[in-house]
Image: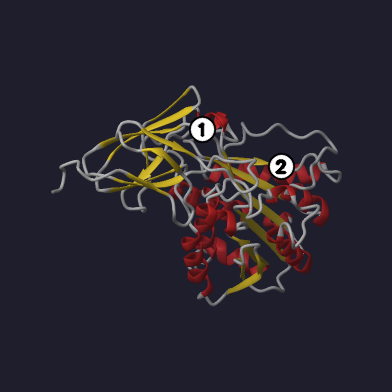
Amino acid sequence: MIGDHSNPIVISSGFDGGNIECLSSEDPENIRLNIAHDAGGEFYQWFYGKLNGTRGQKYVLHIENAGSSSYPDGWKDYNVVTSNDQVEWFRSSTDYQDGVLTFSITAQSDVTWFAYFAPYTLHQHNNLISRCAVRPNVSAQVLGKTLDGRDIDLLQIGEANKPLKIWSIARQHPGESMAEWWMEGYLDRLLDSNDAVSKALLERSVFYVVPNMNPDGTYRGHLRTNAIGINLNREWDKCTAEQSPEVFYVLEKMRETGVSLNLDVHGDEALPYNFIAGTEGIRSWTKERKALQELFKSNLAAINPDFQTTIGYPISAPDSANYGICSSFIAENFNCPAMTLEMPFKDTADTPDERYGWSDIRSAKLGASCVDAIFSIVTKL
């Protein structure tokens, strides 16, 4: 009988991208949960789970180990995303006190999904690759295999003989799912044959796009690491096929093609802003490089008000770069502009949306806007 509140409560995460541990679920208003660690045990924060219960019932869930997660500052002013259909992901009222993250769900059906951010699963990734690969100006390539035997996918858009080689990569940190939502908007814009900006870019540029650098971590429900606990965005100066094949094979391809511009797309747990982290700390930093980076940022802010240029990470001191990080390594070794784009897990402070917060759809829109921002600087590359 629908609505009799007799269904047992079942919390599960045994699916693509899932990560949640149920400690107890007997009391619907005191469901006790933990987030599982990434491989290697150093990181955890990403969660994604399913609640089977009873339509109309109120459930209160407590993530008890939130306070010792990798970025506990990320829980301040944060609201969990929930979904009834895995299509629309909206924010649910959330409270963080004494190291426990508590959120409420009033079930609209017998199945409710909840997550740190709108998931972009490996299944969705494979669909994205297939959807792009059928286009006539796209070459879909497998650069190599991950440690779990998954494909490291590359999309080449346009002709390889074009003078500008524009690279974009995402999800070195697999829990930053907004980065692949960004990729969806970016790719849809580049592949729109009626878009004058994209057409003009492809007349002089070839785009190399890695929508998901870390498919193993994505499937396993990790926050930051690959199958053996390696943080890929610390591997660029020391990557190996045995430890970090995801970086190794991408970098091998970059050396083959060259790089004129690189965008590395991420999410930030704590800051409620979209921003660029630059490469001011590299040895070869120049005022010309700074001017180009600032032009890209200012143009993007003018194109899309969800992006801003005031708040971000502290600027690195001269000659202090960590070359294990993608943007610094690429900028130094390929003598080109390289930037890290960060998006929030929370809502944006300047352009808030009460129902959705920073969302999958807004991430995709920002990806589309970045095509305009690239166009605005392409004559200076």
Task: Identify the residue at image location x=63%, y=72%.
Answer: 141
- Look at mark 2 in the image and give the residue it sits on: 278
Q: Position of residue 364 (x, y in %)?
A: 48, 52
Secondary structure beneath dot 2 equals: loop
Q: Residues within 10 Å of mark 1 (few under 14, many from 20)?
A: some
Q: What is the number of the mark on residue 65? A: 1
Please tell me which residue lies in front, 381 or 189: 189
Colouring method of the image = secondary structure
Quick one: 219 or 249, which is closer to the camera? 219
Q: Amino acid at mark 2?
A: Gly
Q: Which residue is rendered at x = 51% and y = 32% of the image? A: 66
Q: Please give the count of numbered marks on the rendered protein.
A: 2
Residue type at numbered disc 1: Asn
Q: Position of residue 36 (x, y in %)?
A: 53, 43
Earlier in the chain: of badge 2 and badge 1, it is 1
- Where residue 381 appears, as percent x and y from the top left, is 74, 56
Up-down: is 202 above or below 101? below
